[in-house]
Image: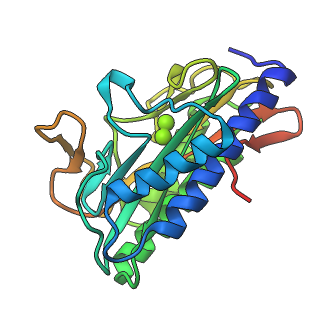
Amino acid sequence: MRRSHDEIAKMRKAGRVVGEMHEATRAAARPGVTTAQLDQAARAVLDRRGARSNFLGYHGFPAVICTSPNAMVVHGIPGPLRLVEGDIVSIDCGAIVEGYHADAAFTMGIGEVDLVAEKLMRVTEESLWAGIAQMQPGHRLHDIGLAVQTVAEGAGFSVVREYVGHGIGTAMHEDPQVPNYWPGRPGPMLKSGMVLAVEPMVNAGGAETILLDDHWSVVTADGSLSAHFEHTIAVTDDGPEVLTLSG
Ligand code: MG
Ligand code: MG
C-alpha cells in the first residue's frame, strides 16, 4: 500500500503523539514506579492530544502501552509490577489521529544497569537504524531484516523470529510483514509512500520465545534479557522519514 502526502501527514501527527508518549513514560520510569503508572502517563498524553489508542481493546488488550521488563520480549500488560534499580523495560506505544496509526517502542534502563543490558539496548537500537537506512525506493523489503540481523548477530545477540514488523496506516497491522532477519528471498520492491513499522526484538541469549499463560506476555525461553526498539517510517523519494520521533 502506498500512502498519499495527506495520509502521511496524518501519520506524522499520530507519530508525534507516540513520541510524546515515549517522553512521558521515559520521564516516569524510575525505581518504585509500577508499570500501571507508566500506562497512566501514556493515557494522559492521548487525552491531552485528543488521540485514540490502537492498543486498548486490541484483541482485548487492557492498556494503552505494552510494558515488557527484563526477559520479557514484547506485549507485557501494565500492572502492579514495581520497577527496580537495574531492570530494563521495553515500552511500546501507539496512537490513532484522524484515522491513521503510529506505533513505536524503546527499551530503557531503570537507574544503573549492567554492561550486558547496556550493550543489548545500544545494539538493538543500532540494528533498528540500520534497518531504517535500507528504506529507500528501489531497495527490497528484506534488505531491512538483513541489515537488522547483521548488526544484532554481529554483536553476539540473537533476533526473535516469531514476532515481526508490519505495514501500518488505517490499521495498526497491515501487510507486509517485516521480519528482522533475512527470510531467504529479497521480497517486494520498496516504493515511495510505503509506511512500515520496523521493530527488532533482540535477545542477549537464544532467539526462542515462550508465550505466558496470560496469552500476551512473550518471554525469552532461556530467561536472557530482551530489548525492543521500533519506529514507524515512511519510504520517500528523499529517503526514510521516521514519523515517530519525539521532541
Ligand atoms: Mg509497537
Ligand atoms: Mg508494531
Task: Name the quarter where the C terminus is drawn.
Answer: bottom right
Q: Is residue 246 above or below residue 243?
A: below
Q: Tell me the quadrant of the picture where the N terminus can be found.
A: top right
Specify whether residue 180 is in view: yes
- Residue 47 appears at what percent x and percent y? 59, 41
Q: Position of residue 154 (x, y in %)?
A: 46, 62
Residue lying farthest to the left in this orientation: 213
Q: How is the image coloured?
A: rainbow
In the figure, 201 relative to 151: above or below? above
Is residue 127 toward the left or the right of residue 112 in the image? right
Q: Is residue 196 left or right of residue 42?
A: right
Query: As displayed, is residue 118 above or below residue 153?
Result: below
Task: Report the residue at 62% width, 19% height from top.
Answer: 188
Instruction: Please count the marks in the image.
Output: 0
Between 109 and 1, the one nearer to me in the picture: 109
User: Which residue is depicted at the point 14% across and 41% down?
Assistant: 212
| Picture coordinates of residue 62, whole percent (x, y) | 32, 35
Considering every residue shown, the one lying at the far top of the view is: 1
Which picture quadrant has residue 37?
Answer: bottom left
Residue 105 makes an appearance in the image: no
Image quadrant in which you'd find residue 31: bottom left
Q: Position of residue 245 (x, y in %)?
A: 70, 52
Vertical arrangement, residue 202 with respect to residue 215, above or below: below
Q: What residue is shown at x 32% (from left), y 22% (from top)?
A: 59
Q: As rendered, which of 185 and 95 lies closer to the eye?
A: 95
